[in-house]
């Protein structure tokens, strides 16, 4: 026998645990036009919460611009220890990864507002031009990370001297 769902259960899609165990099959209820709607059994709250417990990297915000000789990447990494920061550069891509450690000495119940992001972050950017990864440099000043990536000069020519043996 089907029990009528409360307004809150219909609004949020939640189900009572005992209802879920009794009614494994699909249930139908008439809508306001008298037609029958089919409602699939919903996943329970424990399943939904376990999906959110997986640690997902946040996306790092960046500024990317160019000068005549360099491509510059700027990002805020305030509160990140240098050991927790990794920068990988190829000729056409840069990846910045890191982790901002949370102060564990404060109990969650003592927070009134908690808006700062704590945890892992990363960002991979396809660069608009090829760069020389060997000549790149990174500078951190007051939480601002500035990465200078020298552009490859495709028009540069060099003359090779031929050695006779």
Image (spheres, rainbow, N blue to C red):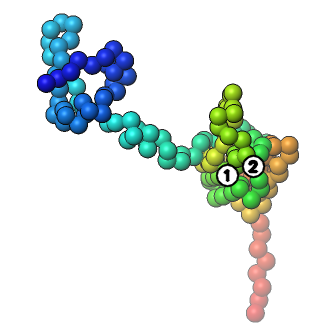
Name which of mark 1 and mark 2 comes first in the sequence.
2
Q: Is residue 131 left or right of residue 50?
A: right
Choose top left, top right, bottom left or bottom right for residue 134. Answer: bottom right
Circle 1/circle 2 CB separation < 8 Å? yes
Residue at left 77%, top 56%? Answer: 82
Quadrant location of residue 65? top right
Query: What x and y, as percent, mark residue 12?
Result: 37, 22
Residue at which label 2 appears: 80
Q: Is residue 20 visible?
A: yes
Please say if 9 is above or below 110.
above
Badge 1, how many Cα within 10 Å: few under 14, some, many 20+? Answer: many
State which quarter of the image contains the N terminus.
top left
Q: Is residue 66 visible?
A: no
Viewer-side residue, 104 vs 135 = 104
Element on which disc 1 rests: strand
Residue 128: percent from left, percent from top:
64, 45
Which residue is under mark 1?
Answer: 98
The residue depicted at 48 percent of the width and 41 percent of the height is 52
Q: In the rendered image, which quarter contains the C terminus?
A: bottom right
Task: Work out whether residue 165 or residue 1 is closer to the camera in this orientation and state it.
Answer: 1
Circle 2 SS class: loop
Q: Callout 2 environment at 10 Å: few (<14), some (14 to 19), or many (20+)? A: some
Q: Quadrant of residue 8?
A: top left
In space, the residues marked 1 and 2 are separated at their CA atoms by: 7 Å
Image vertical order of residue 82 relative to residue 161, above or below: above
Can you give x and y, in whole percent of width and height, for residue 40 in the image? 23, 30
Q: Looking at the picture, how far across and down is residue 46, in whole percent?
A: 39, 40
* Left or right of 51, for residue 161: right
Residue at (77%, 89%) from the top-left corner? 164
């Amino acid at each position: 026998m089907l029990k009528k769902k409360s307004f809150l259960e219909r609004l949020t899609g939640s189900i009572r645990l005992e209802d879920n165990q009794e009614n494994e099959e699909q249930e139908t209820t008439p809508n306001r036009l008298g037609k029958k709607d089919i409602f699939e059994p919903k996943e329970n709250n424990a399943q939904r919460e376990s999906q959110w417990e997986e640690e997902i990297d946040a996306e790092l915000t960046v500024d990317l611009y160019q000068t005549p000789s360099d491509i510059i990447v700027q990002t805020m990494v305030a509160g990140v220890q240098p050991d927790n920061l990794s920068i990988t550069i190829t000729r056409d891509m840069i990846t910045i990864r890191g982790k901002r450690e949370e102060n564990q000495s404060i109990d969650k119940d003592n927070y009134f507002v908690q808006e700062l992001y704590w945890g892992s972050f990363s960002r991979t950017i396809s660069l608009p031009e090829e760069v020389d990864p060997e000549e790149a440099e990174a500078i951190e000043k007051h939480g601002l990370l500035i990465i200078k990536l020298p552009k490859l000069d495709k028009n540069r020519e060099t003359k090779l001297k031929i050695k006779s043996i």
